[in-house]
Amino acid sequence: MTSPYHSYADLARQSIIYYLDQGQVMPCPDSLNGELKKKRGTFVCLKKGKQLRGCVGTIVPVRENLAQEIIQNSVNAATEDPRFSPVGKEEIPQLSFSVDVLSPLEKVQTKSDLDTKRFGLVVRGKSSQGVLLPDIEGVNSVDDQIKICKRKAGLENDEDLEYFRFSVQRYKSQL
C-alpha cells in the first residue's frame, strides 16, 4: 500500500511552490509517462511533523489525467482546506507530502467487507457524503471509520446510506 519516496510527492511539492511563486496553477508537464496519463482520483495530504496541515482530494477523477489531478489537489490542499490557514512558502521545507492514488469505488454490503488499514470509506446519504482515507492514525475500528464518515457528511441516522470502499497506492516524500 505504501511506496517509498516517489515523484508523485515531488510533483505535489513543486506544484505548491510554483503556485506560491507564480500565483497560478502549474502547467501539466508536456511528457507524461504511464500512470500519469491515466485518470484516477487522488488525495494530497501535507503534514508538518505529525500534524496534518492540509488534505484535499477527489474520489473520482475530474481532470484529464493523474498529473493534473495531483497538481490541482496539491494547490487546493495548501490553500483551500477550510480546516487550516493557507500554507506559506516559508513552511515548505518543514512539510512532508503524501499522494494517495485511489482505486475505483466498490459498493459494500456489510461491515465485514471493510478494513480500516486496507480500505478507505465513502458513506453516502441522499444529499451528502463523507470520505476517509485508509490507514489513518487513531482510526482503530470499522465502527470508528463509519462514525467519522457520517460526522463529516452530517449524517445522523443509518437510513438510505450507501457504503463504498476503495484502496490507495500511497506515495510519500521524505523530509
Image (cartoon, rainbow, N blue to C red):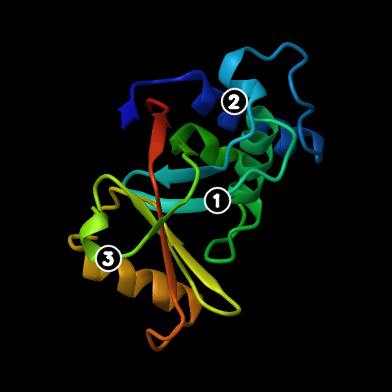
* Residue kind at label 3, given as amino acid type: Thr
Q: Distance between the residues labelled 3 and 1?
A: 21 Å
Mark 2 touches mark 1? (CB < 8 Å): no
Q: Residue at x 39, y 52 (%)?
A: 133
Can residue 87 be seen at all in this image of the molecule?
no
Q: Give the quarter of the figure containing the N terminus.
A: top left
Q: Nearer the viewer, residue 138 or 79?
A: 138
User: Is residue 134 at least partly visible in the picture?
Assistant: yes
Residue receiving disc 2: 11
Q: Dot 1, crowdedness within 10 Å: few (<14), some or many (≥20)?
A: some
Q: Does residue 3 appear left or right of residue 100 in this picture?
A: left
Q: Quadrant of residue 34?
A: top right
In the picture, residue 111 is in which quadrant? Answer: bottom left
Q: Where is residue 105 in the image (x, y as percent from the top left)?
A: 48, 50
Amino acid type shown at disc 2 = Leu
Q: Where is residue 74 in the image (x, y as percent from the top left)?
A: 61, 41
**Considering depth in this image, is 120 or 23 the residue closer to the camera?**
120
Element assignment for label 3? loop
Residue sitting at 51 percent across and 19 percent down? 7
Query: Is residue 170 depicted above or below 37 in this figure?
Result: below
Q: Between disc 2 and disc 3, whose residue precedes? A: 2
The mark nearer the N terminus, 3 or 1, is 1
Give percent across and percent down for residue 60. 60, 48
**How many marks overall?**
3
Look at the picture and state if 24 lies above or below 52.
Answer: above
Q: Which residue is drawn at 73% across and 40% down?
A: 63
Precedes in sequence: disc 2 or disc 1: 2
Residue pointed to by mark 1: 59
Q: Quadrant of the C terminus?
A: top left
Q: How far apart are marks 2 and 3 (CA)?
A: 37 Å
